[in-house]
Image (cartoon, rainbow, N blue to C red):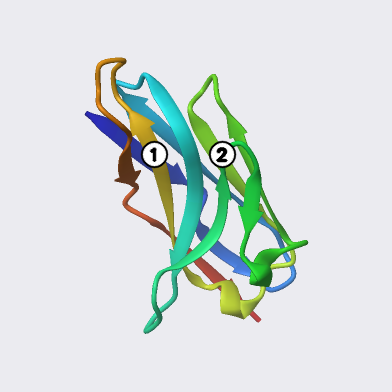
Amino acid sequence: QVQLMESGGGLVQAGKSLALSCAASGTIFSIKSMGWYRQAPGKQLELVATSDSSTKYADFVKGRFTISRDNVKNTVYLQMNSLEPEDRAVYFCVACVKPTALTNGYFEIWGQGTLVTVTL
């Protein structure tokens, strides 16, 4: 069984930075991609950034957020700079994981989410 554990959320002032991390644990043969989504109060879940063979960002975070991965540690990071009140949301980590070499295909695993609150 694969689990994702996010950390790093919290309360921060607008203009400041915050770093999130998400570590995958359990039976893991391969991770094809890892990424971050977020859901603000009353809004739909939206993509923030993903990392597989390349990185992809939502337009609203380009130039402010950076996604990176440590493939040895099966961990993905999200460095968030110049935070705005509109960035307030629960941030979810997601990974596409192949648990064993014999597993047919990849499974999408989600973390429990971590809350980021940005104040003026």
- Would you place residue 56 above or below residue 27 in this image? below
State yes or no: discs 1 and 2 in contact (Cβ < 8 Å): yes
- Residue 96 is labelled as 1
Name the residue type under label 2. Answer: Asp
Mark-to-mark CA distance, 1 and 2: 10 Å
| 99 on left or right of 94 | left
- Looking at the rendered image, the quarter that the N terminus falls into is top left
Query: Residue 3 vs residue 7: left or right?
Result: left
Q: Which mark is residue 60?
A: none
Residue hosting label 2:
52
Q: How many marks?
A: 2
Specify the farthest residue to the right: 63
Above-or-below relation of 37 to 1: below
In percent of width and height, residue 5 lies at 38, 40
Considering only vertical position in the picture, is 67 above or below 14? Answer: above
Where on the picture, by quarter, is residue 16?
bottom right
Asked where in the image residue 60 lies, by quadrant, the reply is: bottom right
Name the residue at 64% across, 58% down.
57
Q: Secondary structure at mark 2?
A: loop
Question: Which of 76 and 56 lies nearest the eye of the viewer?
Answer: 56
Left or right? Give the position of 34 relative to 42.
right
Mark 2 Cα-neighbour bin, 10 Å: few <14, some 14–19, many ≥20? some
| Category of crowding for the residue at label 1, using alpha-carbon neighbours closer than 10 angstroms: few (below 14), some (14–19), many (at least 20) | some
Question: At which x and y percent is residue 42?
Answer: 37, 84
* Vertical placement of residue 24 versus 77, above or below: above
Kind of residue indicated by mark 1: Cys
Please report the residue visible at 66 percent of the width from the left and 81 percent of the height from the top.
120
Q: Residue at x 31, y 15 (%)?
A: 101
Q: Residue furthest left?
A: 1
Q: What residue sits 50% from the left and 53% below the top?
A: 36
Element type at mark 1: strand
